[in-house]
Amino acid sequence: MGTPLGDFVRARRDSIQPESLGLPDHGRRRSPGLRRSDLATRAGISVEYLTRIEQGRDRNPSIAVVNALADALSLDPAERNHLRYLAKITGGECSAHVRSAPARRDVRTSVLRTLRLLEPGIAIVTNRVGDILAHTSAFEAVTSGTGLLDTDAPNLTRYVFTDSRARTFFADWDDVADEQALDLWLGPSVENSEWITAELAPMAGADFTRRLNRHVVPQRGALRLNHPSGRELRLVRETLDLSSDAQQLVVFLPADEGTDLAVEQLRRPSRSHLRVIS
């Protein structure tokens, strides 16, 4: 049985073309990407050891080995952080601690006060599984008519993978889907895993499972939205990590004057109010 660490290393190896690293092309292969022997050589480890990591038979590689693999795979900073995180949760000594608590749904009073100060801006509080726990009135205006907030307990991850409207609303749906799948790894409690396995995966289908296990680390550039009103929005995201609560406060800023004007037009009919869902 594989591990998150092994799955990520194997997926990244399969995505690398040898010539991009200055290595010779050995011709047709049964599988794409970099040969296991080439990666092992670049990382300074044996092929047998790399095989054990990829297959999940070695769950506790040293920090030096993890860093060597990051260098050998030419990972960018975000991918390196994800690799180190996966090494942490894969290791037996850390898994019990990391998997001990469910996703928190209540929002601290001080966080709600902070969110209120952000009105009339666009902002939300979410937990690691994508539950939208609180939001400003501007966020409601920007997502009006999309179906995202239609349920009593809106969840961004479930919306992205199970609501057909999401593929129109998010202009770069593939990137957003990869983001949501990757973020689930940041809160791998027992309760979260049960929700993913029992509820989300059956509804979301094979595409969700594939994205979850291939660990693509997106660049998280400007978020492009196609609002049902016909307006096109480009938003820059700034995220404040609320690590003690396993939550995050996300602020969406207009990336250009056209978006700024469009947001103002969408916001105009609604009165400023803060909504707490949890």
Image (cartoon, grey):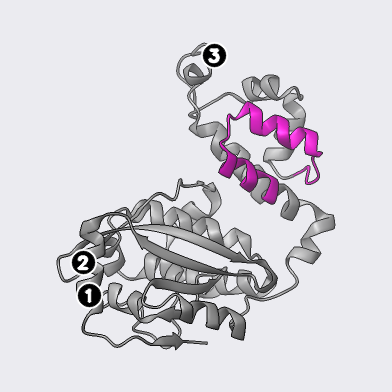
Q: Is residue 133 visible?
A: no
Q: Are marks 2 and 1 in contact (CB under 8 Å)?
A: yes
* Mark 2 lies on residue: 262
* Residue plotted at (45% across, 53% down): 178
Question: Residue furthest toward the right?
Answer: 93
Residue 119 sits above or below residue 207 on the image? below
Where residue 190 sits, quadrant-wise, is: bottom right
- Whole-Å distance between the Cαs marked 1 and 3? 53 Å
* Mark 3 lies on residue: 23
Question: Residue furthest toward the left?
Answer: 230
Residue 43 sits above or below residue 234 on the image? above
Mark sitting earlier along the chain (2/3): 3
Measured as percent of width and height from the top left, residue 146 is found at 27, 74
Out of 163 and 173, give the one closest to the viewer: 173
Mark sitting earlier along the chain (1/3): 3
Q: Which mark is residue 266?
A: 1
So how many labels did they put on this image? 3
Where residue 232 sits, quadrant-wise, is: bottom left
- Relative to 173, is 19 on the left or the right? right
Q: Is residue 80 magenta?
A: yes
- Whole-Å distance between the Cαs marked 2 and 3? 49 Å
* Residue plotted at (59% across, 40% down): 77
Dot 2: element? helix
